[in-house]
Image: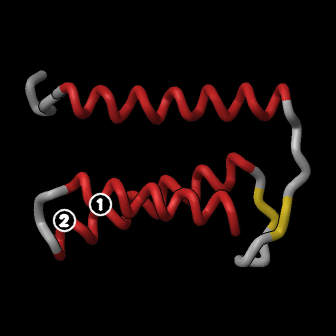
Amino acid sequence: MAWMAWTWPTAIFFLVIASLLVTFTVLAIKFPETPRTGVLRIETTRGDRLFITLLGSAFINLAWLGLVGDHQPWALAVCLVYAAAVFRWV
C-alpha cells in the first residue's frame, strides 16, 4: 500500500504524540491532580489542557499554511507560545 508517504517528519510527529500521551498517563498516576478552573471557566486537568493544546495547534498550523504558506518552523514557535499559555491560564 503506497497511498501514504511515511517520512521521517511524519514518524517523529506520531512518536512525539505517543510519548506525550505516555508521559501524561504516568504523571496522572504518580501525581494525581484536582481539576482547576481557568480563563475558560471550565474545570480542566493536565490531559484536558494537552487536548486543547493539540487541537489549537492543529488549527494554528492549518491557518499558517493557508495564510502564509511555507516556513512552518515559525508556526511551531507560535504553537509553543500557545501551549505555554494554555497550560498556564486555561
Residue 25 at x, y percent in the picture: 70, 30
| Label ID, residue 75 | 1
Q: Secondary structure at mark 2?
A: helix
The answer to whether residue 39 is above or below residue 20 is: below
- The reply, left or right, for residue 21 in relation to residue 46 is left
Q: Compute the Cα span from label 2 to label 1.
A: 9 Å
Locate residue 77: give its quadrant.
bottom left
Q: How is the image coloured?
A: secondary structure
Q: Nearer the viewer, residue 81 or 29?
A: 81
Instruction: Return the residue nearer the eye: 78 or 28.
Output: 78
What amino acid does circle 2 point to?
Leu
| Other residues around mark 1 within 10 Å, as few (<14) / some (14–19) / many (≥20) | some
Give x and y (percent) for residue 59. 37, 66
Q: Mark number for residue 15?
A: none
Q: Position of residue 81 (x, y in %)?
A: 47, 62
Name the residue located 71 percent from the left edge and 77 percent from the top edge: 40
Q: Is residue 53 left or right of residue 34?
A: left
Quarter holding the N terminus is: top left
Q: Quadrant of residue 14?
A: top left
**Label pair 2/1, CB-CB below 8 angstroms:** yes
In the image, which disc is placed on residue 65?
Answer: 2
Q: So how many labels did they put on this image?
A: 2
Quarter holding the C terminus is bottom right
In the image, residue 49 lies at what x, y percent?
65, 56
Provide the secondary structure element on which disc 1 rests: helix
Q: Amino acid at mark 1?
A: Ala
Q: Residues within 10 Å of mark 2 (few under 14, many from 20)?
A: some
* Residue 38, image quadrant: bottom right
**Which residue occupies 18% across, 27% down?**
6
